[in-house]
């Protein structure tokens, strides 16, 4: 009988699914699963300590599940003496140790890691990651020949493809999109429905000590740590969302409440992105809640759209646009990220709250990311690469494939309008309408001019005026330029002066 050498089956920290392609390609009786906590991955940006702890703890537990299931697993801990501290280094080391001459991987979700595996001296066969609904090539076919890549049309294709929320050939309820009924301001007393909090077990406690010792200087609080770190726990988190927060998800999707980080959001992105949950079971659970009358259609449709619409669309854009996407800077912005993004030390209440929640939970919700931290960075003209690196570091769910199109494209308009048909910018009024921050802020949202005025107000006009050539002809923005034209000359001059003063103050920070 011929004895074939083992092959190495590489499983990365965001590939913790038993149905992952590389495991399907493997032979349990012959191959060796390789998993490694490595310095290179833990430090290419200063990840939030909670994010590193989530990934390491979930990796250790997944490795144990694989062993229980009969796999041979070569697992490297960060502090192991022999650790080569890079993914490729670990493949080379394990190959030398076991006699393996080739490796199998599920294609990584990041250009940087794909390129590293392609350059590995041990051949690494990369199999498509089929945990997504839409393969990159299917997205490219959809995009081919279209003048604009609008998410809404892509989403309808995904509804048809999956049959989710369909009534035969028609969308359930007669409409594809129920946002008209969504996005209400917070009602008085709207507060957190806390997601379930999981008591750290021995594995988690060990990881927390390691992360504290090695990454304690990174921005972000490690403790208390209550994230799910196994699929079983993530399923509990899913069930909790469906029962307790989904019914009002649509209504309060865009609401912001001081000190309340979670509201009606699912807090599932981090589990979905590392493979503990999959899109299908999440969407089926949400659809079942609608079919049984436990949640209304506006919430369920709005939620499902985020997952089979936005999430898949964003991934399609990342792979369509290629590795240079993170270097795009269509508006030529060059300001450094204000230092308070790393401390929360600002007297603007909305920014402070979003940044402190980020520090405490490695989480803030979509509207805080888009219309508070993202909006401010765009209005003041921060270099989009710096904005991208901040978002990639500070959120537990941040992996480049999903973070970059949201930041470079949706939030900073640095891709020139591929993801967003117009820049997501606003003055203080939007934040005032959707939150209770302004009543607790050092600035006055109703004032536009002077040192007491909410900085978002004058900065908003400054942004529009300095980019007039680019946006005045955009039909979705023309109205704002008409409003500006109708203001008297003194008000316009004072507004721009206020904005300049705000920008000068930022330079002194
Ligand atoms: P919910 O509000 O409950 O939404 C449900 C699910 O829909 C999420 O879990 C997520 O999987 C998906 N989803 C919703 N919106 C998007 C979107 N725009 N793109 C992709 N998936 C989406 N999401 C990440 O997963 N990782 C990131 O690094 C990330 N960075 C972002 C940066 C910016 C500037 C912006 C504007 C958005 C970003 N998002 C990112 C999208 C979105 O903000 C998060 O997915 C969401 O806040 C996660 O919280 P949740 O699980 O409670 O989501
Ligand atoms: C994000 C991350 C971190 C912090 N650490 C590791 C690690 O030590 N080992 C590992 O296999 N993966 C890690 N990851 C996830 C990888 O960076 C991820 O696979 C790539 O970003 C591709 O999405």
Image (tube, rainbow, N blue to C red):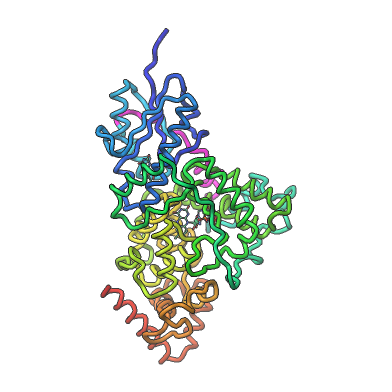
Say left or right for 169 vs 32.
right
> Quick check: 381 above or below 277?
below
Is residue 292 at least partly visible in the picture? yes
Which one is nearer the viewer's eye here, 301 or 383? 301
Q: Which residue lies at the image location 45% right of the left edge and 57% below the top edge?
A: 363
* Highlighted magenta segment, given as a residue range: 121-146
Q: At x 64% / y 50%, what residue is drawn?
A: 286
From the viewer's side, name the closer residue of 329 and 107: 107
Q: Is residue 415 above or below residue 487?
A: above
Q: Is residue 332 visible?
A: no
Question: In the rendered image of this protein, does residue 378 appear above or below residue 444?
Answer: above
Q: Position of residue 15 (x, y in %)?
A: 45, 39
Instruction: Say which quadrant the N terminus sits in.
Output: top left
Instruction: Decide if residue 205 is on the left or right side of residue 430.
Output: left
Quadrant of the image where one finds ligand 2: top left
Q: For the point 25% across and 32% down, which residue is it?
A: 82
* Nearer to us in this view, 399 or 361: 361
Question: Would you identify the image quadrant in which residue 357 lies?
Answer: bottom left
State the residue lying farthest toward the top.
1
- Vertical position of residue 294 compared to residue 383: above or below: above
Query: How many numbered tags mark residues here?
Result: 0
> Looking at this view, is 195 or 428 the one in front?
195
Horizontal and vertical percent for residue 253? 57, 63
Where does the image place residue 260, in percent across and percent down from the top left? 50, 65
Q: Is 412 contained in the magenta span? A: no
Q: Residue at x 48, y 27 (%)?
A: 68
Whether residue 84 sits left or right of residue 496 in the image: it is left
Residue 215 placement (x, y as % from top left): 30, 50
The C terminus appears in which quarter of the rendering? bottom left
Whether residue 128 appears in magenta in the rendering, the answer is yes
């Amino acid at each position: 009988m011929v004895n074939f050498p083992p092959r190495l089956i590489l499983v990365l920290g965001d590939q913790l699914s038993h149905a992952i392609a590389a495991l399907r390609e493997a032979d349990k009786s012959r191959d060796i699963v390789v998993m490694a906590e490595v310095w290179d991955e833990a430090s290419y940006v200063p990840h939030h300590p909670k994010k590193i702890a989530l990934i390491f703890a979930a990796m250790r537990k997944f490795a144990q599940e694989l062993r229980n299931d009969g796999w041979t697993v070569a697992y490297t801990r960060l502090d192991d003496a022999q650790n080569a501290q890079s993914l490729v280094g670990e493949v080379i080391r394990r190959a030398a140790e076991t006699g393996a001459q080739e490796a199998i991987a599920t294609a990584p979700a990041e250009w940087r890691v794909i390129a590293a595996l392609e350059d590995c001296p041990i051949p690494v066969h990369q199999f498509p990651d089929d945990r997504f609904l839409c393969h990159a090539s299917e997205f490219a076919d959809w995009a081919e020949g279209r003048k604009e890549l609008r998410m809404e049309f892509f989403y309808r294709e995904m509804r048809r493809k999956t049959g989710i929320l369909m009534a035969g050939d028609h969308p359930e309820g007669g409409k594809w999109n129920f946002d008209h009924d969504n996005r209400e301001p917070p009602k008085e007393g709207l507060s957190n429905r806390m997601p379930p909090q999981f008591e750290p077990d021995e594995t988690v406690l060990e990881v927390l000590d390691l992360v504290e010792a090695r990454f304690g200087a990174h921005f972000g609080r490690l403790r208390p740590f209550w994230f799910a770190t196994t699929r079983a726990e993530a399923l509990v988190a899913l069930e909790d969302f469906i029962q307790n927060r989904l019914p009002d998800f649509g209504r309060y999707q865009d609401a912001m409440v001081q000190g309340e980080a979670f509201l009606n959001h699912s807090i599932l992105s981090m589990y979905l992105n590392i493979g503990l949950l999959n899109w299908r079971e999440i969407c089926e659970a949400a659809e079942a809640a609608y079919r049984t009358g436990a949640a209304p259609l506006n919430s369920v449709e709005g939620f499902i759209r985020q997952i089979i619409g936005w999430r898949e669309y964003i991934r399609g854009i990342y792979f369509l646009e290629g590795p240079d996407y993170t270097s795009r800077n269509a508006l030529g912005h060059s300001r450094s990220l204000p230092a308070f993004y790393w401390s929360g030390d600002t007297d603007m209440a909305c920014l402070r709250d979003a940044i402190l929640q980020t520090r405490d939970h490695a989480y803030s919700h979509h509207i805080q990311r888009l219309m508070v931290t993202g909006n401010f960075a765009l209005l003041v003209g921060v270099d989009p690469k710096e904005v991208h690196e901040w978002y990639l570091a500070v959120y537990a769910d941040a992996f480049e494939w999903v973070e970059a199109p949201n930041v470079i494209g949706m939030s900073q308009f640095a891709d020139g309008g591929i993801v967003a048909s117009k820049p997501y910018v606003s003055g203080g009024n939007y934040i005032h309408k959707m939150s209770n921050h302004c009543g607790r802020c050092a600035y006055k949202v109703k004032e536009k001019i002077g040192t007491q005025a909410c900085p978002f107000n004058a900065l908003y006009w400054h942004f529009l005026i300095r980019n007039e050539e680019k946006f005045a002809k955009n039909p979705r923005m023309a109205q704002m330029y008409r409003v500006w034209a109708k203001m008297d000359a003194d008000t316009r001059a004072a507004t721009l002066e206020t904005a300049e003063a705000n920008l000068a103050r930022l330079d002194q920070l």
